[in-house]
């Protein structure tokens, strides 16, 4: 996984924009720490694994889903999925569809939240993805 840093495919094929970047934000005076990036995408966009690995979690969070995939010492997390088509313990391949992007309840946009971790330390996902 590490040797592919800066060369991983995007978790959605048709990325419209990054609506929230990695890091600390202040929204109306309230501090928020985004552990990943929020990617706006077309309605019903498939969400794809960025690298081969094993699904270690599929969690329903108030009607949307979180999928976590292990890539050795690294993990990728994909949240705000309205549907998933993988299960815990399943092996996945690079660019395999794992679910469908959901609608952000605040903005009404179709978005997926994408995160990268080494162990339990979050990392900036932009540095892992291939450039445009």
Image (spheres, rainbow, N blue to C red):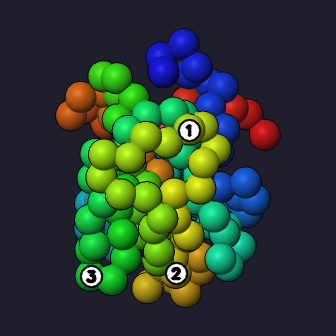
Q: Taking 100 as reference, is 44 left or right? A: right
Count residues near mark 1 (Cα–Cα under 10 Å), then give few for <14, some for 14-19, many for 20+: some
Q: Taking 62 as reference, is 43 left or right? A: right
Query: Which one is in front, 109 or 90?
Result: 90
Count residues near mark 3 (Cα–Cα under 10 Å), then give few for <14, some for 14-19, many for 20+: few
Instruction: Using the image, tell me which numbered label, if any, was put on residue 103.
Output: 2
Residue for point 44% across, 84% down: 106
Is residue 126 something that shows in the picture?
A: no
In contact (CB < 8 Å): disc 3 and disc 1: no
Q: Please provide percent x and percent y for residue 96.
A: 60, 48
Q: Is 11 situated above or below 50?
A: below
Q: Is 84 situated above or below 34?
A: below
Q: What distance separates the C-alpha of mark 2 from that of mark 1?
A: 25 Å
- Which residue does the numbered mark 1 point to in the structure image? 93
Secondary structure beneath dot 3 equals loop
Q: Nearer the viewer, mark 2 or mark 1?
A: 1
Q: Is 61 situated above or below 127?
A: below
Residue for point 62% across, 31% down: 8
The quarter of the displayed image where residue 46 is located = bottom right
Is residue 83 something that shows in the picture?
A: yes
- Which residue does the numbered mark 3 point to in the structure image? 62
Q: State which tag comes first along the sequence, 3 or 1.
A: 3
Count residues near mark 2 (Cα–Cα under 10 Å), then give few for <14, some for 14-19, many for 20+: many
Q: Return the residue found at the far left.
A: 120
Residue for point 21% across, 34% down: 120
Q: What distance separates the C-alpha of mark 3 from that of mark 1?
A: 28 Å
């Amino acid at each position: 996984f590490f040797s592919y840093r800066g060369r991983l495919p995007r978790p959605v094929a048709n990325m419209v924009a990054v609506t929230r970047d990695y890091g600390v934000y202040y929204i109306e005076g309230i501090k928020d720490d985004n552990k990943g990036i929020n990617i706006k995408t077309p309605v019903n966009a498939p969400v794809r694994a960025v690298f081969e690995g094993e699904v270690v979690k599929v969690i329903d969070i108030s009607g949307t889903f979180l999928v976590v995939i292990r890539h050795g010492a690294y993990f990728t997390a994909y949240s705000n999925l309205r549907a998933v088509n993988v299960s815990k313990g399943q092996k996945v391949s690079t660019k395999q569809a794992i679910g469908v992007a959901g609608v952000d309840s605040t903005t009404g946009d179709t978005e997926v939240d994408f995160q990268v971790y080494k162990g339990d330390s979050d990392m900036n996902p932009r540095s892992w993805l291939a450039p445009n």
